[in-house]
Image (tube, helix red, strand yellow):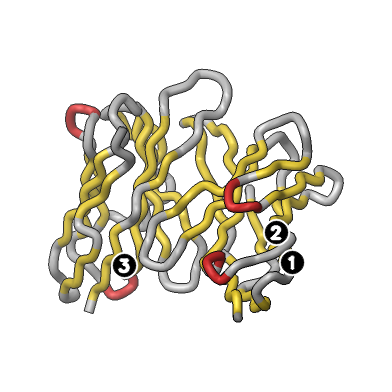
Amino acid sequence: EAGVTQFPSHSVIEKGQTVTLRCDPISGHDNLYWYRRVMGKEIKFLLHFVKESKQDESGMPNNRFLAERTGGTYSTLKVQPAELEDSGVYFCASSHETSGSYNEQFFGPGTRLTVL
Amino acid sequence: AQSVTQLDSQVPVFEEAPVELRCNYSSSVSVYLFWYVQYPNQGLQLLLKYLSGSTLVKGINGFEAEFNKSQTSFHLRKPSVHISDTAEYFCAVSKRGTGGFKTIFGAGTRLFVKA
């Protein structure tokens, strides 16, 4: 079974440009998460989808970031316009839906974004 | 608010020596605890996890961690490291909130294993 995949693996853009990151979760996983690690800092939660609905977007840094998950399958994270401080590694994770005990989050390889 | 503190940002160690990577967390309620590893140019890989039960958890590649509730610690250990263990290690907690589970990570510890 394929794991969580992310595209692209690397992206280098100029300040002010737009970038769209894509995450394909493990098939059948209703939960999809985005995390980000900026240089030298901890990995921070951005938002959580359950199917196509945003369950928690408390970690989104500002309105330049837009996440979507149309159809409840893959998700995109768009940054528009990109700023220097957006540089970092963006991780996606997915897990089974659960109403009770914890289900493991499986992480993708990340997209390394560099804004020049 | 939940927080995770990894006490060492970098740990250099010689091959075949033991290593301990320290992690403390803050919580007044039950949490789930994890260690992840990120090898150079790769994604996050789960090393081990504590959900409940025995406080000594064994993971992949010979790593183990001990959950200490009274000290709110979850230190990672390996009795003899290899060059291939050179990587960055992240301690994390996961707690259920109103919207579901959210994972909170420490800042990471870079382990350098020298020959």
List x then y, in percent, for residue B115: 60, 81
Quadrant (top left, top right, bottom left, bottom right) of the C terminus of chain A: bottom left
Q: Considering only order in the chain, which callout, 1 or 2, is on the residue closer to the N terminus?
A: 1
Do the residues indicated by labels 3 and 1 lie within the same chain of the protein? no
How far apart in space, not on screen, are marks 2 and 3 (Cα)? 35 Å
Do the residues indicated by labels 2 and 3 lie within the same chain of the protein? no
List x then y, in percent, for residue B114: 60, 80
Q: Residues within 10 Å of mark 3 (few under 14, many from 20)?
A: many
Q: Residues within 10 Å of mark 2 (few under 14, many from 20)?
A: some
Label 2 close to label 3 by CB (< 8 Å): no
Label 3 close to label 1 by CB (< 8 Å): no
Residue at figure coordinates x 62%, y 75% from the top left:
B10
Residue at figure coordinates x 62%, y 73% from the top left:
B9
Q: Quadrant of residue B56?
A: top right
Q: Residues within 10 Å of mark 1 (few under 14, many from 20)?
A: few
Horizontal side of B27 relative to A15 (left or right) equals right
Residue at figure coordinates x 44%, y 53% from the top left:
B44
Dot 3: chain letter: A
List x then y, in percent, for residue A30: 34, 27
Marker disc for residue B18: 1
* Residue located beneath label 3 in the image: A86
A27 over A114 or under it: above or below: above
Which amino acid, mark 1? Pro
A53 over B21 or under it: above or below: above
Label 2 close to label 1 by CB (< 8 Å): yes
- Label 2 residue SS: strand
